[in-house]
Amino acid sequence: MSKALALVVVLFFVLFCGKCYGELRVGFYKGKCGLTNVEGVVQNVVETWHFENKEKDIAAALLRMQFHDCFVKGCDASILLDGLTSEKKAVPNSSVRGYGLIDAIKEALEAECQGLVSCADIISMATRDAVVLAGGKWYDVETGRRDGDVSLASNVNLPSATISVSDSIKVFASKNLTQYDMVYLLGGHTVGVARCSLFKDRIYNFNKTGGPDPSMSPWLLAELKDKCPRISLIFDNTYPLDVKTPSLVDNSYFQEIKKGNGVLQIDQQIALDELTKNIVDDTVNDPDFYTKFGEAMVKLGRVEVLIDEQGEVRKSCRVVNKKPFIFGGIN
Ligand code: HEM
């Protein structure tokens, strides 16, 4: 290397090193915790919670948690921070669950290697493990994220169940995700449930017509009428998003939405809209469906991540280390 070139390289690092961050990578924690296998610790706790049934349908809890974390200020575990006005207090997050499981994983990891594993990485690793336990296929998770120190309910701007396909595509595109990724990620609705209040209009008063959404199959309409009465003053019942195998990560969600059995409006619409219909058709016959779902989850895990000194590794996933974080208000 000529002296001039060497000088340029040195100058570049001196001037811009603050912006020279590392990258996410598979196996980031390998060898960083003595003989302890970090991913193994996560997996053990997830398996214990799964088999002891400490949290119902862990895959559903964590898939949704990862989506809601990554779509608000990136995958930085901001959803986990406690506070009177932190993200978890926002209405779209009111039914997000799984926080206790993340605490248990964090505790197990801190006991082995203090201050090493970020809460953001815990969400990604645990979600993958839960997907596998629910019948999905293993995918390698990238790690190396840091945790954020801002969590405000007012930042939560997640898509609603009635968003149009074209608007949803725009939202996903703003997170560097294609419409292809979007369809596969909506496959997360292969597990878990939705509250009747979020799709009741489709049963009784679709688009203010006083009748049901015509795209709904007669079978689903009868089912939903039964489980979600027009007037229910006390209970907001729930109904499975995948009407056939609600506890399994598989592609039956896609098979069902093709039959008019999509519970949320957006679920049904992706099977009908010209922009996404062909992708849904592909998922149904795709022998590589599970691999592609995993790839889409890895892409979700890359959204606006914090690396190195851009973030911190929290001691507790519910509180930031550095600044005085007061009820989600001042950061
Ligand atoms: C346009 C995008 C999306 C919309 C509009 C949407 C909407 C919803 C709604 C309204 C619910 C029911 C919530 C409740 O009853 O309180 C729900 C549940 C759920 N969502 Fe989504 N979602 C989207 C994308 C995703 C993605 C990308 C994933 C994961 C990869 C995901 C995973 C889940 C899961 C697993 C549940 C069930 C949670 C449980 O049973 O606790 N969703 N979603």
Image (spheres, grey):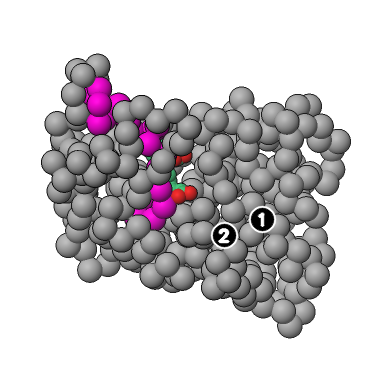
Q: CA distance from mark 2 to mark 1?
A: 8 Å
Residue 278 marker = none
Question: At which x and y percent is residue 301?
Answer: 51, 52
Mark 2 and mark 1 lie on one chain; the one further toward the N terminus is 2
- Does the numbered disc 2 mark a residue whose Cβ is under 8 Å from ligand 1? no
Residue at x-position 52% and y-position 55%: 62
**Picture quadrant where residue 126 is located:** bottom right
| Image quarter in which the C terminus is found | top right
Residue plotted at (80% across, 55% down) = 315
Residue 112 position, x and y percent, is 78, 73
State the extent of the magenta-drawn residues as a range. Answer: 189-206
The answer to whether the residues at label 2 and label 1 have Cβ atoms under 8 Å apart is yes
Q: Which residue is mark 2?
A: 55
Asked whether residue 331 appears in the rendered view, the answer is: no
Numbered-mark total: 2
Q: Type of residue at label 2?
A: Glu
Dominant SS in magenta: helix
Up the image or down, 253 lies above or below 207; here it is below
Question: For the residue labelled by badge 2, is the local secondary structure a helix, a strand or a loop?
Answer: loop
Q: Going by the picture, which residue comes out furthest to the top?
A: 208
Q: Secondary structure at mark 1?
A: helix
Q: Write the residue at 20% across / 39% down.
A: 221
Q: Residues within 10 Å of mark 1 (few under 14, many from 20)?
A: few
Residue 100's label in the rendered image is: 1
Q: Quadrant of ligand 1?
A: top left
Would residue 117 be counted in the magenta stretch? no
**Does residue 151 appear anywhere in the picture?**
yes
Q: Point out the frontmost of discs 2 and 1.
A: 2
